[in-house]
Amino acid sequence: MRRATPLSSVCYSTKPFILVIAALAVVGCIVLIIEIWHPSTVMSRMLPSKAVRKTTFEKDAGPMFVSYGRADAKLVSHLFQVPNTSRAVWKPKLVGSSCGCVSVNVEPNEVPPNGILKVQMSFRPGYARREQVERAVVSTGAGELAFVLRASVFPIVWPERIGRELTLESDCAEVATRRVYISTYLPLSSDNSGKRLSCSTDGVFSVRLLPIAQERIGDLAVHERYEARITYAGKVLQRGQTVTDVLRWKLGDAELDTSISASRLAVITASPNSLFVNGTSKMIHSALTISGKEEFSVIAVTSSNSMLRVHTQTSVPTGQSTSHVLDLVLSLESTRETTDTWKCDVIVETDDDAQPFVRVPVWVLES
């Protein structure tokens, strides 16, 4: 009869394997702890590096005060420095940016392990009160890195939603008045503190400024809002005649020139002159009312700005009437992610011999 193997012999024969497994478990725990505290320092040497974690680097440049219309506005700029913690040699290349106004300089051409990737990003701030955010993406050959640069833009003189041109229309043109609103933002540390907005012209128009609101924005700036009553009281204009002038806004050392014109009221007019677009869908659905003193019909509707297109056109009346309501769906062909204002003319083609085309000035605003 075969004798049974003693239990002590079995334990002795398996003891080396148990010790090996325990040792591997201890090493694994140590590696895991080191990887948690210092990511990629151990695993990058044990495993081949196939990709870099997609990381977003952000910089807030803080408040930027700009003078509307000046070409010497200060650049918003920042140098991002990213260490290469992988085993791979990075070959950085700019993939793209959020706007053509963004300048991105990437160097060096190759970044070895433990080297530093330098991305110099800058842009010239727009002239509107907003949080301007610009983005850039750089490929390293092993992954992509995203860079975000933001700034709080404060225009010192800012005509709200009126662009750089104003038009007054009057049936008789003896008196034509338009009310517009102007905002000013002055930093508290500025030498211009306490100064007020003024406006001068060449004499064709007169401007009366009425301060209507004032508020302090934290420890940064003082915001004042004005109502400007712009009046033309010159000679009676003939149909088709136009007179122009220049409005020179001044606040301390910040200046802005806008043009102003007055013309005889057209036979056909349209409203509204402000359309709101959803920032996500970039679509506009609006009812455009075309009115005239005499009966006319509408043939077609187009746009003078390539950024705003008549996407669909429904219920375009063709019969003779003094008023037509057009149910329009427009699309804004823009990739900008920031709030902005676009100006264009919606062109209505009619069968009126005296005025075959009606140009309706429209400001498109992101809601």
Image: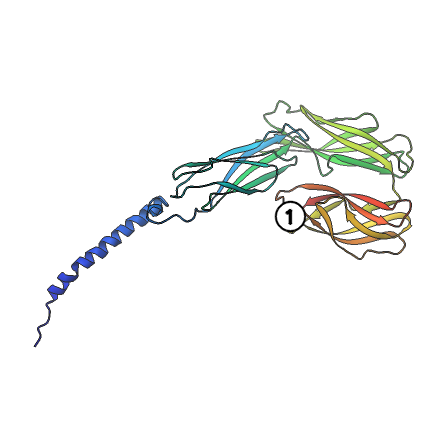
Q: Where is residue 95 in the image (x, y as percent from the top left)?
A: 54, 43
Colouring rule applied to residues: rainbow
Please report the residue visible at 12 percent of the width from the left and 66 percent of the height from the top: 7
Q: At label 1, which amino acid type do we have?
A: Gly
Q: Where is residue 252 in the image (x, y as percent from the top left)?
A: 67, 23
Q: Where is residue 14 in the image (x, y as percent from the top left)?
A: 17, 61
Please report the residue visible at 69 percent of the width from the left and 41 percent of the height from the top: 341
Most foreground residue, 287 or 74: 74
Left or right side of 266 for 124 = left
Quadrant of res 199: top right
Q: Mark 1 points at which residue?
A: 279
Q: Answer few, some or many: residues within 10 Å of disc 1's Cα (few below 14, many 20 plus, some between 14 and 19).
A: some
Left or right side of 235 for 12 = left
Most foreground residue, 325 or 19: 19
All told, the count of numbered labels is: 1
Quadrant that contains the N terminus: bottom left
